[in-house]
Structure formats: C-alpha cells, structure tokens
Image (tube, grey):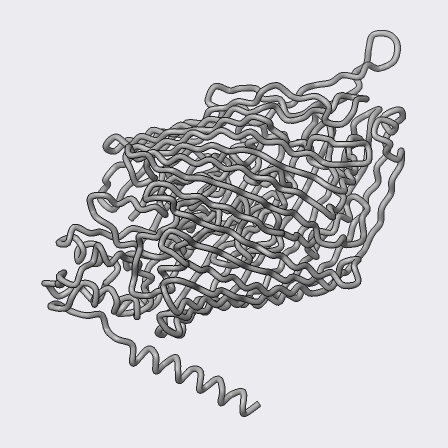
Amino acid sequence: MQKTYKRLLIILACFAAQTILADEPASAGTSLAEFLESLRTQGLGIIYSSDLVSDEMIVAEQPDLADVRSALPDILRPFGLTVIDGPTGSLLIVEAATPVVAAARVKSELDRPLPEIVVTSSLHQVQYADSGTHAYLERELATRIPAAAEEAVRLTNRLPGTASGGISSRNHIRGGEVNEVLFLFDGLRLYEPYHMKDFQSLASIVNGSAIAGVDFYSGAYPARYGDRMSGVMSMDMRRPTKRAETELSLSFFNASAFSMGSLGASHQGDWLVAARRGNLDLIVDVIDPDFGSPDYNDLLFHVGWNFGPLADISANALVSYDKISLIDASVGETANAKYENHVFWLKWGAEWSETLRSETIVSFNKINDERRGVLNLPGIVSGTLAESRDFAAFEIKQDWRFAPSARWMLSFGIRARDQDADYVHTSVRTITPPFDQILDNEAFVSRDLQLSPDGAQYAAYSELRWRPADSLVLDLGVRWDQQTYTSSDDDRQYSPRASVLWSVDDATELRLGFGEYYQAQEINELQVSDGLTEFFPAQRAQHIVANIKHQLDVGIDLDVSIYRKTFRTLRPRFENVFNTLTLLPELQFDRTRIDAFRAESRGVELMASFGSGSDNLFWWLGYAWSEVEDAVSAGKVKRSWDQTHTVKGGISWRWGAWDISAAGEVHTGWPKTELGAVRNDSRYPVFHTLDARISRDFTVKRGELTAFLEVTNLYNRANPCCTEYSLQPTASGPDELVAREAHWLPVVPSLGVVWRF
C-alpha cells in the first residue's frame, strides 16, 4: 500500500513539475511561429501552415497573455491571418480573406484530407493526411441547414448514402440496420445515444450546442473503429475560445442552456455545462392532449486542466432522462416508458514528444430502462408487456500515435470492457384467427423471462500510415476483438483493413478502401422481448469502396463513389411488415422473424458541393443508386429500407443579417408487403419532401440574438410509410377488414430563438 501511495505522489510531483517548468508564451519581439509554438506547449491544439506563418513575421506588440485565446485573432490580424475551429477541437490558422479550409467544407462521403497543412509536429502532418473515407460536418452547418429538433446528428441524413423516413434521428448507412453505427462523443462510446429509443429515437442525448463537429464514416473506416459494421459517427466536444461564453435557446422542440469558458491565468483549464429540456410534451398538450406526454432531458458537464504536455486531464459526465406516456387510439395502443442513462468518464491526453502522443479514457456507464404497454385491437390482436433492463459497463481505452517523420505514423490501442445486465420481461399476446395464419405466428404466446448475463469485451488494433511519395498515402491496419459471453465457445474476430489515397494532381484525388468489419451483440442488446435468450456470435461485413474526387476551377467539388458491402453470420432480426410506426411492435400480429444467412448492398453515389458553412453561399446536390437484399431460404428479398434512386440537395444563402436555407429529398418508395402476399414484394409511392429555414441575427445590448423559423415537410407531402388494419362493424354480416394508410411526418413548423453572449 505504501508503494502505491509513493507512486501516486511521484506522478503528482511530475505533473506539478511539468506545470511549473512549462514555457510561458513568447512576448513582443519574438517571431509569430515561436509564439504559436509556445502556445502549443501550453496545450492549445494549434495547426498552421509554414507557408502562411513565415519566420519574418514578428509579434510587434505585447500580447494579452491573460486571455490568449480571445486575443489570438487580434494577434494574427496584422499578418492577414485569422483562427477558426478545426477538427477534434483544434484551432486552424488560415488566411483572413479566405477562411475556408478543406476540413470545413460541405463534404460527401469522402472528405478531402489536409496535405497542405504543415506544422512543427510531424505527428499533426501525417495525422491529417487521412486516406480513410469520411465526411467532416462542421458546427456551422448545423446552425444553417434545416434539421428537425435542432439535431446536429441529422446532418448525416443529407448525404446520399443514408436512408431515413424522416422521423428518427437514426439512419441506415449503405443498406445496414440503424443499430450498425458506432456513436462516439469526445472519443467515448455511447451505448444508448438516443432519447425515446423504443419510440423512433427522435433526438440524441448529446445537446447540439456542445458539438464542435461530426466525423461521419460510411465505409472502409480505419481499424481504430470497431464493433459496428456500417458506419461511425464521431462527435467532438466544443472548446472555449473566450474566457466565458453562453447560449440560451428556446424552440418548439427544446429549451437549452449552454455555457463554457476557460480557467486559470494562462487558460490552462476549461469548463462546459449544457442542459436541455425537450418541449414535445408541452406541444402535445396544446395540439392533442389525448396523445400522451413525451418528456426528455439531458445534462452534460465537463471540466479540464492542462498540467503540461504530459497531463491534459478532464472529468466529464453525461446524464439523460426520459419519461414517456403515449396513446394511439387508432390501433388500440398505450405505452409508458422510463429511461435513465448515466455516463462518467476521465480523459488523460499526453504529448510525450513532438512525435508521440497518447490518450486514455476510463469510463463508467449505468443504464436503467423500463417499458410497459397494453394493446387491444378488437378481433385481431391483444396483449400486455412489462419489462426492465439494467446495464452497467466499466471500460478502459487507450490510444497511441507515433510519427517519427512526416512520412509515416504508427497508431495502436487497446480496449477492455467489463459489463453486466439484468433483464426482467413478461408479456402475453393473443392473435385472433385467421390473423395468426398470415405470418405463421403462434395464436397465443406468454413469456416470463429473467436473465442476468455478464462478461467482457477486449480489443486491440494497429494502423500504419505510410506516405512513400507526396502524392500517395497508404493505410494498413488490423484489429482483434473478443467477447466472453456469446453462444460461441471462443468468439474472436480478426479484421484486416487497407486504404489508399492517390493525389493525381492538385485538384484530383483517388481513394480505394477495403476492410472486414465485425459487430458483436452487446450485453444490453439481448432480444428478450422477441423471446431470444442467447447471444449470437458477432456479425460480419466486408467493405469495398472506390472514390474519385475532383475540384473544378470554379470551386465546385465533385465526388463519385462506388461501393459493395457483403454481410455474413447475420443474427435474426425482427420487423413489423405492415406498420413500423407502432408503440409496441413485439405485440403486433405482423411481427415476423427474418433469418438471413447473407446480405449484400451495392451502390453508386455522386455528389457536387460548393462552399462551406462559413461562406455566404453554399449548396450541395447528390444522387445515389443503391440496392440491398437479404438472402433467405425462400430466395433474395429486398430489405425494408431499400431505395433504388435517391436525390438529395440543398442551398443556404446568407444576406447580411438574414440566412435562408432549404434542403430536399426524393427517393424511390420503400418496399411494401401486401396482406397475404410475399414480404416486400411491392413498393410505396415515391417519397419526396422539402425542409426550409429562415433566420435573422440581431445585435442586442449584450451579445447577439438569432430568431429562426424552420418548417419540416414544407408543402405537407403525405408520404405513406405503413398500413394499419382494423375490423369495422357492418350493417349486416361479419365485421369488415379495413386498411388505413399511415404516413411519415406531416408539415412540422418550429419557431425558436438563440441568445449568445
């Protein structure tokens, strides 16, 4: 025990020494490059080009060292430079006249890397020469592009490779299921990242005000990302640029308070608080009080302190709470639910040298879910359901990056996660003949299940990024994963990954990507509500992607992508073939099990874009042809979200204090199942919708005020999604079976205001 205390004291002493001995920022008379480098040693993630910051640039006046971040734009202004937010919380030094860099542009699936950024650290230089396939969606876009409920994660729905009905914040990426996306915030895995998760997942649990940007991968992503097989959504937490800044917002959907700032005389520390309340319950009380009360809240807290290059430490907490009561009288459903999600994590970043960096995260997750419901559709189906699901996970994650030169970088890391869950489920369902024969469902099912699984997950990966020539970047990686709780005696997976970036010329880039991607069934994903009590082995998907990107002389970016994704060792999934917008899907008579032994998704995507979120004008237009099919015992069947042709586009124009934006989508109708026919053998009509947003900025006595009006489905298009069945009495004879077509979202307006000071 004494040894442990001594080691802790030594570590604390080292941290204190790093803080005391750290260099103070340079003062007047030094070169700008030396000044920026001194800020980097203080923990500021500054990235700049040696072409922009020359040795001849001298800081003439004494900088305000008490508030360096706020003073940085004034320090750079005499040199024709400014600073903007970059990816992963960094600050990018750019020309003041053209503050648009490649990382901040509206992107298609394949983002342009940053080979032109040259900094004093070779680690930064190779890190941004990313041959992977992804889009970086900057925060500025989220404040301008129409997005229902002001959800930043909905920006991904604007890309041609995603499919969504428009209600849920989740989407299908290149044919995959919605649960095949790895959701990261501040580098931490979030297991249940959505509010109202059993009721269309209307919003994420991360307040959009706290998000700096989103890295979105839709294919062939690197080996550091694992355990989800279709996509990655990695969100960065905002970092302060002032001593303190606050945002208060109110709209039809949310009421939010957000504040962040820096700590310490030299801004060694920072803090952030974000609290949000969903306003849907208030809106429902006014529009349709008989429908129920969907209520959700979330709170994010962060405090960090930079003790020196070896100890950038932060403590964080994210808490969400949902309390839901919903009634759909048209189909006889009543549902109540309560969800509590607690996430705590400590983060330690260390820059051991200009070539070696590490990041360690220790986290604890605690999730408690409860759901109850009653279904009574006379003459067709009736039932009750009550369940609780508790989940806890303790995880240690560590990532290292080593770049001894500007030509190559080695990344490696490990994960260890201990987790357990408790399930209590009871349900009864009775299907009235002849409806029990339509999908070969049992007429009566009663379940009473109690399970307490526990186990561990381990992972390790290694990536080598090599730049043999200025125009060529190679990425090679391998990943190992293991689960100890599945039905397999030894569930281990090995995942090779490879990608190539070839800069054909200054305006053209070619990317090729290949990889194996496994997805384990998590401890909290046991399908007890559908009667399954065992965990299945990990699923597998193989990605093959090719992309070419070209920038025209007029500034328009063009992207063409071709992909093929094959799925293997798929576990059973359950769907409601007639009506997907149901509150209690497990009790409905159209619930069916799909046992696909293989699936394949393929497609071609084209994207044109101009400008970025910081420009007065930007627009994008994309088209996708795609196809996704399951291979089942009866043959090949289209997946229920297959959409052959998709066109998506939008435009935003800033005119003085006004900002006017619109975004629209047209795609082939999703597959439809007729009563008594083959599943997904027909289609719904073509889906099309248009969203619009108009906002105006006002300068007030303290800060700035933005008022906005946003309308989802502007022209109130009735896009059919599903079919509801009921029995209606007739004047004479037996009751008549009546089918009613249900629709996706109608016109939904939202009026809001944001006050920044």
Q: Position of residue 286 (x, y in %)?
A: 53, 29
Q: Quadrant of residue 637?
A: top right
Q: Quadrant of residue 629?
A: top right
Above or below 316: residue 554:
above
Q: Position of residue 745 (x, y in %)?
A: 56, 27
Q: Residue at x 47, y 65 (%)?
A: 410
Task: Determine whether, in the image, residue 672 is placed left or right of residue 410.
Answer: right
Quadrant, the N terminus: bottom right
Q: Nearer the viewer, residue 703 or 284?
A: 703
Task: Determine whether, in the image, residue 281 is placed left or right of residue 738.
Answer: left
Task: Determine whether, in the image, residue 466 is placed left or right of residue 420.
Answer: left
Q: List the single residue furthest toward the bottom.
A: 2
Q: Quadrant of residue 661?
A: top left
Above or below 287: residue 418:
below
Q: Position of residue 272 (x, y in %)?
A: 40, 58
Q: Residue at x 40, y 85 (%)?
A: 13
Q: Is residue 454 at least partly visible in the picture?
A: yes
Q: Is residue 346 at least partly visible in the picture?
A: no
